[in-house]
Structure formats: structure tokens, C-alpha cells
């Protein structure tokens, strides 16, 4: 502090600023308020308790159990599942028992994967119930008795004392169990509920919350709310109503809907055509004729639909989950691996997540002549040995760490000093005091540590110290004063300094936030702690200080859209309750964002469940762990970065597989639709199934392929995905028809059009040629769909390459040599040529893909699929770009003006001979 500042401070007595603790309060309805006036030492009668139990229910969190069988059946829903189930039923109808068994097995496997991975979400409610008190002391019929906490009702008079878990929401009465006024206020730890890092002082008339813990004092309270109506009960209710369809499931359903529509449309047309053709070939259609046509169409359907899509994606995500587990990131919900790649906003609790949830010694205020070591040594002498208070623990820890004299001492014995008397902390005096003999100086002195107001008064006043404490308080730091008696007197005190305490950021939190922002993930702090503390921590983490309080989320004059914009532009929110955290996530999701949420307490559980990806941190509560999708086993948030990188790699593999599989389906359907209707040409059913099974089995190894990790949050962009699939599918169709016509018209290979599989006059070579082309050309396309750029920018892994090539080399050999009843031999020339053409063609498709991606833009999407939402979004983007351009131009004008001013100034100095050499 400068001399001028000291002069201003000392001109008049400086007073301590009173920083009011802000707490969310709510008014009770008049009919409930009328029930809260029982005589404190009399309590309710048995009849009143019975009547109110019937009215309000038991003081417990109820839950609805889901029937496990119905839950299992729910995994058989969805567009792709319905199409597979239709094929399953038709297989049974036409008595195709091989397909019936294969399709049924795939359905059950897919359902089991989902059921096993996601069946434990309801455990969050059990974890919340475990935080409730089991027994309570309550006045009933004039007697203080112990009852089950579940039997409490509004109006009950309960006794709260040190160490008690508070059994229900209540209002403090300010009196003790004997009816006298309470000497001291309560200190209540409600950090698990609100996220506040320090115990909160509660006085007469204040509300205490169920599941919080009394840390100091004892007092009677009247129960105001029980069960689901309590603070923690409302959090449990938010968890139970949050059961939305996951983002990944929505994406799979959108892909499925597209494939279902084109598959059913084309297959129905082919079925009608084949039925009419068969009717022309025979005098009268028999049941066998209809079943034969149905069987052919069924095989085409099974080969076309991506029956392996859910399995391949589940295996890919399971491999990602195993990779994350090796980095101490446990995935509870498998689809969270994919959704984490798309998260663009990460809401994070503060206490215990971004911070250590442990009070720590910060930069102190020192009086002249004293050092930090002096301050810590004297504060240690005035500390109570063995006290479990977080403030005492923080002081003792810092002293042993930073004072060389104390680093080696055991217990509370200090070399060269002897404490002859000790006065422990008293809520009335608000200080601890010790009398100490200093053997080195051969003197006796007293040392005191306590509330700044008390210590400053003890030393006779100190405006500069008071001003320093006020500055610390404005930043949210807790201060403690330390004083000692002057040499030669045990009555006159001098101030040593002020200890400042703060729950500090974790060592890796700042770096994690910076790396998240580099990857396009915006981190927002959402905490129940006080606004000034939140702003101080945000500043230390390198975040902006645009932190809003809870009132900005409950503004009755603001629309949901305006509230969502506030959430989008704010850097965080403070003084929030579980409903507010839940609301922040909900509002951000309404903007179309995928939201991640990290937390460790009961108060975080609803938001963790609501978020697209809920992340419970190390040492979290059971409620948070149960509600989360991902659990971190290592302290800090640094593993979140590993999770994001791994999930983005998994996402790229899944998207590349989806693009490949949709492309294959489009090619398959268009080619066989046209060739069946135009040329009456059909492929043997067993070859169609062979293509589908062999190629899908090979693509399972995509889960271990190299991936190009995006620098921004990933998006599926379904419109782009389907459009690209149609373009590539059409290009593959052109290749297949080229092969067909060249074989037929140039090399004079019979096309066998209109001939059945059992026809002895059938040549069979054309069928094998088309089989090898339809098997290899789309399959090699996966080398291109792996990434948005050219395929050589990130080469595939050796395992992936070997698996893909091996399946097609196998297809080539069975085509070259032929297998009786499956393929007709076509010779080495055709086999090798077709495989090389397919390999070369994927390079052509790769160039087409890159060209489409480069010209693709949101404006193009709006032109191709103009919806009202897209048009509005495009308008907002254009307006934002105009504003950004104006700002850029204005900044450029200011820069030019500054350069001109500097140049003029330089010339003036030069003219006066002041320009430096």
C-alpha cells in the first residue's frame, strides 16, 4: 500500500464492511404456515402427526421402479430395429430358418448391449436416499423422543445439535432444548447441497435444509417441508423426470428413417414387379410362387438394410470406453462416448471440481517488521491441537509447510517454545488465545488468532488492516487476524497481520479450461457459492468474470429465448440451487448445443442427469456418481481432455462407417432396383447375404483404425451425410452398370436375364462378376469415407487395411476359382482386374468426396432443405457476420488513427530535438 493510500485510510476510522451471505429463500403458502406454530417444548400430538402424515406423506423420497422386462423390450424400438423385425417376421413366414436365426440373434445381441450398459440409471435415487438422516430427536406430546426420520411431518419440533444430519427442511426457532435462548448460532455444512465451500452461519428464522450437517451449536427448529417437497427431494424429482432419448439414438433413428423409406419403397416396387412377372409366366399364381418372390425380396431387404450398424457402432464405442478406462475415465453409458465428441459447452461445478474443496493459505496482509513465516508461526501457536475445523486445519497445514522450524516437529510441540495455557475458540469471543514461553528470548508472551473485527479491536484499532480485510472480503477471501503482546507486557497487543484463506483452484484446472477452449469447448462455471467467490476463482482460472447470480435465471420479464442467450454469453452463474443448474443445462440445450456437466455433490445430480454428458469427478457423492454418464477416478479435470480427444477419434470412426454403410445401401438398392426392373436380372440370394455378412464383419475392425481428430466439436450433419451417400452411391451404381455392360457387350458374357438359379442353361459368370464388383467397390470406399480430406492425409491402420483387403481377396479367389452352388469361376484375369478397378475407383470417389465437402456450406443446406429454423439461423449468422465486420473495420480505423497520431508526435519530438537516437 502506497503512502498516499495509507494517509487516506488513516484520516478517519475505517469500518468493516458487512458482506451479506446470499441464500435462496422461498415463501411458504399460508395454509402450510398455519401448521407451524406448535408450542416448542410441547410439539405435536399423536393425532396431529397421523393427520399430517395422511396429508403430506412420509418424509422420504419415493420412486417408481421400471419393469426390467418392459425396459428390455424398449430396446427393440427404432427405425432400423423395426425394419429388421419386419425381415425377421417375413423370414418365419416364408420358412427361411437360416435368415430367421441370424436376424433374431442380431436383434437380441443389440438389445442386450443396450440393456446391460444403461440399466443402472435409477441408482441415482437410491444414492440420494442414503444421504437422509435415519433417526431424529423430536418433541411429541410434551416429550423429547427419538423417532424414525421418515415419520416427521410439517410442524414437528426437532432438536438439531453438533454432528446431526438434518432430517427435513426446517426453520430455526432460536431456542435450546430447555426453552432458553440459544447462546450461539448454528454453523451448517450444506456444501453437498449448494456447493458452498465453507459452513454457513444460521440464526433464528433461517432455513436449514434436509441432508446438511450441523457443524457447531444446537437449537430447536420447526419442520417446514418433508419428503419430495424438501430441497433434496426436489433434486430427486428432477432426476426422476429426466429420461430423454439420447442424442446418439436420435441420430441413429434419423439414419434409420432414411434407409427405411428408400428400402421399403424400392423393395415394394420390386415385389409388385416380380409378382406380376411371375403371374405372366404361370397360368395361376400358387402359394409357392408368392413365397418364392417374397423370399427373393426378403433376401434383398436383409442385404440392403444395415443390420450390423448398431453392432458395429456399439463395438466401436465399447473399444473407446476401454481406452478411456485405461486413463481412469469410467464410461457408464456407452453412447456418452459418442456424445462427448459433440459437446460444445461444458458446465462445471466449482467446489470440489474446479477447486480443491479445501481451505488453503493465500497471500496474507502483513504489518511492517513481520514476515509470512512470523504470521504462520504465531497463528500455529494459537491453534488448537487436533481440532477438525477446516480453518484450523488450513492454518496448521500452511505453517508446517512454510515454516522450517515446524516442518520437522511432531504433534504440537515446537522447539524453543512452550505453550503454558490455551483458551480454545468460543463462539462468543470469536478467537483462540495462547500464553507462550519463548526459551530463546527468555520471555513470556500471549498470541491470539480470530475474527478480524475482534483482533483489530484487541490491538486498539487499525484502519489500514481494516481496509485490507475489506479488500479481501470483496474478493471472497476469508480473513483471520493474528496478534501478540509486545515484549515486556502481557496486556498490550500488536497486530502481526491477516491470514487470507480460499478454496483454491486445482493445479490442473486452468490448463484444462485452456485446452478445452482450444478444442472449441466453452467452459462455464455453475456454483452454489457466493458471487464474489465465484468471480475470484474465475479470475484465477483465466476465465472471464462475467458471472451472473441466480436471479438472472428467474427473471419473470424475460422469455426463454432471452434467458438462453444469457446462458450462452455468461461465463457462469453463482448462488444457484439444483433447479437453477438443471435450468442452465436445459436452456443451453434449447439453443441446439450439446452440453456436458461436471460435478461432485448432491446439488449437481439433476444437472448431471439432464446434460447430454454428465461427468462425476473424483471423490464425488454417490448421488452424483449414480446420475453421471462418465466417472473420473483421478483427481482434477485433466482427464476430461483425454476423454474429449478419445471420443472425437471414436466419433470419426463411427461417422466414416455410417457414411460407408449408407453409401453401400444406396448403391445396392439403386443398382438392383434398376437392373431388376429394366433387365429382369437377379442375383442368387446366398450371394446377397454373403456380401452383407462378410463386409459388415470386416468393418468391425474400424474400432481400432487411425482417426483424424477434429479441432472443433463434431457434428453428424445428417443432411450432408445423406447427400454425400447418395452422390457416392450413384457413382458406384455407374461403375456397376459399366462392368455389367462391358462384360455383356464387349466380352460377350451372357447376362442370364430372367433365368432362375436352378436353370441349367444359366452361364453364371455374369452373376460372379457383378458379385465381386458389388462386394469390393463399395467396401473399398471406406478408405475414402474415413476423413473429410484426401485419403492419404491420414493413412488407415495396418490392422484395418489388412482386414478390408483380406475380405475382398477372399471374394476374389472364390470368384476366380468358383465354388459349387455359390459362384461360377471367372478366371484370374477377370478377378484381378475387377479388384484393381474397385481400388482405383475409390480414389476417384475420394476426389468427388473432397470436392463436395469443399463446396458444402450452411447456405447450401438451406437452399437444398429450406426449413423455417434453418432460414432463421442463416439470417442470424449473416447479421452476426455484418456486426463482426463492422467491429473489425472500426478497430482498423482506430489502429490507423493511432499510427497517424504516433507519427505526428514523433515528428514534433524530432523538431524539438527530443527524438531518441
Image: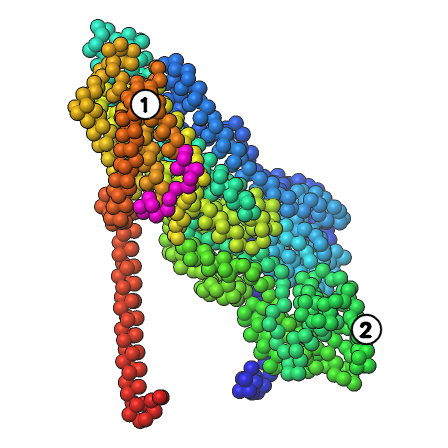
Closer to us: 737 or 396: 737
Relative placement, left or right, of 676 versus 648 is left
User: Which residue corresponds to mark 1?
Assistant: 815
How many C-alpha atoms fall within 10 Å of the one at disc 2: few (<14), some, or many (≥20)?
A: some
Res 814 → quadrant: top left
* Residue 801 in magenta stretch: yes
Dot 2: element: strand
**Quarter of the rendering containing residue 176:** bottom right
Picture layout, residue 434 above or below residue 387: below
Apparent side of residue 867 relative to residue 206 in the rendered image (left or right): left
Task: Please report whichever mark, 2 or 1, sits nearer to the chain's N-terminal start.
Answer: 2
Q: Quadrant of the N terminus?
A: bottom right
The residue shown at (28%, 85%) is: 904
Which residue lies most toward the top here? Answer: 283
Q: Which residue is mark 2?
A: 418
List x then y, in percent, for residue 823.
32, 19
Residue shown at 79% from the left, 68% from the top: 413
- Of badges 2 and 1, nearer the viewer stands 1
Evaluate whether residue 866 shows in this view: no
Q: Residue furthest front?
A: 828
Would you say the residues marked 2 and 1 are in contact, meaning their CB atoms lie under 8 Å apart?
no
Who's the residue at 20% across and 11% down the image? 280
User: Where residue 703 appears, x then y in whole percent?
Assistant: 44, 38
Q: Which stretch did the figure color magenta?
A: 789-803
Q: Position of residue 146 (x, y in %)?
A: 74, 46
Q: Is residue 661 magenta?
A: no
Image location of residue 240, percent across then percent down: 52, 41
**Res. 806 visible in picture:** yes
- Name the residue rendered at 55%, 45% in the picture: 326
**Nearest to the observer: residue 549 or residue 872:** 872
776 relative to 213 in the view: left or right: left
Name the colouring of the figure.
rainbow
Amino acid at each position: 500500500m502506497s503512502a498516499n493510500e495509507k494517509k487516506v485510510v488513516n484520516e478517519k476510522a475505517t469500518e468493516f464492511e458487512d458482506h451479506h451471505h446470499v441464500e435462496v429463500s422461498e415463501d411458504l403458502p399460508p395454509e402450510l404456515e398455519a401448521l407451524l406454530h406448535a408450542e416448542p417444548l410441547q410439539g405435536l400430538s399423536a393425532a396431529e402427526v397421523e393427520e399430517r402424515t395422511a396429508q403430506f406423506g412420509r418424509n422420504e423420497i419415493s420412486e417408481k421402479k421400471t419393469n426390467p422386462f418392459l425396459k428390455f423390450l424398449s430396446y427393440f424400438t427404432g427405425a432400423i430395429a423395426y425394419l429388421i423385425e419386419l425381415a425377421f417376421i417375413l423370414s418365419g413366414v416364408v420358412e427361411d430358418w437360416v435368415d430367421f436365426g441370424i436376424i433374431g440373434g442380431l436383434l437380441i445381441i443389440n438389445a442386450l448391449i443396450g440393456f446391460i450398459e444403461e440399466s443402472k440409471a435409477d441408482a441415482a435415487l437410491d444414492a440420494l436416499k442414503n444421504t437422509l438422516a435415519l433417526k431424529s430427536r423430536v418433541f411429541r406430546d410434551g416429550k423429547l423422543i427419538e423417532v424414525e426420520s421418515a415419520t416427521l411431518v410439517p410442524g414437528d419440533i426437532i432438536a438439531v445439535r453438533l454432528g446431526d444430519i438434518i432430517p427435513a427442511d426446517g426453520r430455526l426457532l432460536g431456542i435450546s432444548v430447555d426453552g432458553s435462548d440459544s447462546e450461539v448460532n448454528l454453523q451448517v455444512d450444506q456444501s453437498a447441497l449448494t456447493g458452498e465451500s465453507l459452513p454457513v452461519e444460521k440464526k433464528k428464522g433461517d432455513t436449514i435444509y434436509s441432508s446438511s450437517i450441523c457443524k457447531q451449536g444446537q437449537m430447536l427448529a420447526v419442520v417446514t417441508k418433508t419428503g419430495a417437497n424438501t430441497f433434496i427431494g426436489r433434486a430427486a424429482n428432477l432426476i426422476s423426470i429426466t429420461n430423454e432419448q439420447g442424442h446418439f439414438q436420435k441420430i441413429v433413428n434419423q439414419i434409420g428413417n432414411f434407409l427405411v423409406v428408400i428400402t421399403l419403397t424400392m423393395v415394394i416396387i420390386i415385389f409388385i414387379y416380380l409378382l406380376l412377372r411371375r403371374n405372366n409366366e404361370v397360368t395361376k399364381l400358387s402359394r409357392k410362387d408368392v413365397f418364392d418372390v417374397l423370399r427373393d425380396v426378403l433376401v434383398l431387404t436383409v442385404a440392403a438394410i444395415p443390420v450390423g450398424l448398431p453392432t458395429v457402432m456399439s463395438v466401436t464405442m465399447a473399444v473407446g470406453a476401454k481406452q478411456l478406462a485405461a486413463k481412469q475415465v469410467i464410461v457408464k453409458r456407452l453412447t456418452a462416448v459418442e456424445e462427448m465428441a459433440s459437446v460444445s459447452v461444458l458446465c462445471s461445478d466449482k467446489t470440489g471440481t474446479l477447486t480443491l474443496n479445501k481451505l488453503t493459505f493465500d497471500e496474507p496482509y502483513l504489518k511492517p517488521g513481520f514476515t509470512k513465516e512470523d504470521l504462520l508461526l504465531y497463528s500455529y501457536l494459537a491453534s488448537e491441537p487436533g481440532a477438525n475445523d477446516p480453518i484450523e486445519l488450513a492454518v496448521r497445514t500452511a505453517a508446517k509447510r512454510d515454516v522450517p522450524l515446524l516442518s520437522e516437529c511432531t504433534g504440537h510441540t515446537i522447539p524453543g517454545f512452550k505453550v503454558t495455557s490455551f483458551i480454545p475458540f468460543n463462539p462468543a469471543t470469536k478467537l483462540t488465545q495462547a500464553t507462550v514461553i519463548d526459551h530463546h528470548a527468555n520471555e513470556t508472551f500471549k498470541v491470539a488468532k480470530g475474527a478480524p473485527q475482534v483482533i483489530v479491536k484487541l490491538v486498539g484499532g487499525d484502519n489500514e488492516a481494516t481496509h485490507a480485510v475489506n479488500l479481501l472480503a470483496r474478493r471472497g477471501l476469508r480473513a483471520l487476524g493474528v496478534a501478540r503482546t509486545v515484549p515486556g507486557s502481557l496486556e498490550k497487543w500488536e497486530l502481526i497481520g491477516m491470514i487470507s484463506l480460499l478454496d483454491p483452484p486445482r493445479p490442473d484446472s486452468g490448463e484444462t479450461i485452456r485446452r478445452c477452449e482450444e478444442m472449441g469447448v466453452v467452459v462455464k462455471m455453475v456454483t452454489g457459492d457466493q458471487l464474489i467467490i465465484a468471480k475470484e476463482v474465475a479470475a484465477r482460472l483465466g476465465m472471464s468474470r462475467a458471472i451472473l447470480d441466480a436471479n438472472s435465471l428467474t427473471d419473470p420479464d424475460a422469455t426463454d429465448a432471452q434467458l438462453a442467450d444469457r446462458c450462452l454469453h455468461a461465463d457462469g452463474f453463482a448462488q444457484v440451487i439444483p433447479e437453477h443448474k438443471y435450468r442452465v443445462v436445459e436452456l443451453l440445450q434449447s439453443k441446439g448445443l450439446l452440453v456436458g456437466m461436471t460435478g461432485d455433490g448432491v446439488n449437481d445430480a439433476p444437472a448431471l442427469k439432464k446434460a447430454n454428458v454428465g461427468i462425476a469427478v473424483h471423490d464425488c457423492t454417490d448421488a452424483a456418481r449414480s446420475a453421471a454418464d462418465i466417472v473420473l477416478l483421478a483427481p482434477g479435470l485433466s482427464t476430461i481432455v483425454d476423454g474429449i480427444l478419445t471420443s472425437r477419434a471414436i466419433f470419426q470412426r463411427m461417422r466414416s462407417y455410417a457414411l460407408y454403410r449408407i453409401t453401400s445401401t444406396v448403391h445396392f438398392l439403386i443398382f438392383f432396383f434398376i437392373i431388376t426392373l429394366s433387365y429382369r436380372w437377379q442375383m442368387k440370394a446366398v450371394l446377397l447375404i454373403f456380401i452383407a455378412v462378410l463386409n459388415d464383419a470386416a468393418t468391425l475392425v474400424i474400432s481400432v483404425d487411425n482417426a483424424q481428430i477434429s479441432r472443433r466439436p463434431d457434428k453428424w450433419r445428417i443432411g450432408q451425410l445423406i447427400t454425400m451417400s447418395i452422390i457416392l452411391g450413384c457413382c458406384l451404381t455407374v461403375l456397376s452398370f459399366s462392368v455389367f455392360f462391358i462384360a455383356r457387350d464387349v466380352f460377350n458374357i451372357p447376362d442370364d436375364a430372367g433365368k432362375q438359379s436352378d436353370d441349367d442353361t444359366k452361364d453364371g459368370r455374369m452373376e460372379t462378376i457383378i458379385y465381386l464388383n458389388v462386394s469390393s467397390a463399395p467396401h473399398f470406399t471406406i478408405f475414402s469415407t474415413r476423413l473429410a480430406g484426401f485419403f492419404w492425409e491420414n493413412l488407415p491402420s495396418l490392422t484395418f487395411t489388412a482386414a478390408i483387403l483380406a475380405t475382398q481377396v477372399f471374394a476374389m479367389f472364390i470368384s476366380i476359382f468358383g465354388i459349387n452352388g455359390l459362384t461360377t469361376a471367372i478366371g484370374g484375369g477377370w478377378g484381378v482386374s475387377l479388384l484393381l478397378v474397385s481400388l482405383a475407383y475409390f480414389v476417384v470417389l475420394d476426389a468427388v468426396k473432397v470436392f463436395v465437402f469443399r463446396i458444402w456450406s450452411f447456405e447450401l443446406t438451406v437452399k437444398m432443405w429450406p426449413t423455417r429454423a434453418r432460414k432463421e439461423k442463416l439470417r442470424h449468422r449473416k447479421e452476426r457476420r455484418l456486426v463482426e465486420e463492422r467491429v473489425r473495420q472500426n478497430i482498423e480505423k482506430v489502429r490507423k488513427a493511432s499510427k497517424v497520431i504516433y507519427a505526428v508526435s514523433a515528428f514534433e519530438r524530432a523538431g524539438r530535438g527530443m527524438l531518441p537516437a
